[in-house]
Image (cartoon, rainbow, N blue to C red):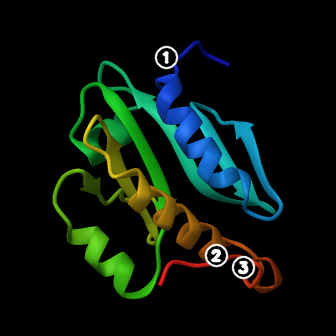
Amino acid sequence: MADYPDVPEEFLARVRTRCAGLPEAVEERAWRGTRWRVGQRTFAHLLEVDGGKPASYAEASGLDSGSVLTFRATGPELVALSIAPHPFFKPRWAANVVGLVLDADTDWDEVGELLVESFCASAPKKLADRVDRPA
């Protein structure tokens, strides 16, 4: 695997903490960055864009360098986030994937809610039903 820059430890720790309590969620190294899965479905992917690479993430996010988190959304939330301005972005590679540029102004409570919703959109119903969802 190529040597890519890691996301800042603070961002990794914050996402890791929010995913740790989700039933049967697994953290693993991705082709670039870190991803969280439930079963065979990725519900969160955290990576660093560096020097415009990976190009697909740089193009979608508008970043040359920086940290991004992608996750799944459904229904009205997907529609709203797909057209929301920065720090959100809509990648082209999957209909229900949305991205978020992470920085010093990131609302980590909102990230936690988005990760829970992404997990529930990706998990089997029996696992999703075990999760306390945002109101």
Q: Residue at x 57, y 31 (%)?
A: 33
The span from disc 1 to disc 3 (Cα, nearest Å) is 33 Å
Residue 69 in the image: x percent, y percent?
45, 46
Q: Residue at label 3? A: 128
Label 1 crowd bin: few (<14), some (14–19), many (20+), radius 10 Å: few
Residue type, mark 2 in image? Cys
Q: Earlier in the sequence, mark 1 or mark 2?
A: 1
What's under tag 1, amino acid-wise?
Pro
The nearer-to-camera label among 1 and 2 is: 2
Q: CA distance from mark 1 to mark 2?
A: 30 Å
Determine whether the residue tagged by mark 2 lies in a helix, strand or loop. Answer: helix
Q: Which of these two is toward me, 3 or 34? A: 34
Q: Which quarter of the rendering shows the N terminus? A: top right
**Up/down of 76 relative to 20, above or below:** below
Which label lies toward us, 1 or 3?
3
Residue at left 73%, top 62%? 22
- The image shows residue 47, relative to residue 119, as above or below, that is above
Q: Is residue 62 left or right of residue 14?
A: left
Three-letter code for the amino acid on which mark 3 is drawn: Ala
Q: Using the image, determine if residue 32 lies above or below residue 105.
A: above
Circles 1 and 3, Cβ within 8 Å, touching? The answer is no
Left or right relative to 71: residue 89: left
Query: Mark 3: which secondary structure?
Result: helix
Question: At 33% across and 52% down in the image, what residue appears?
Answer: 107
Q: Mark 1 — residue?
A: 5
The residue indicated by pointer 2 is: 120
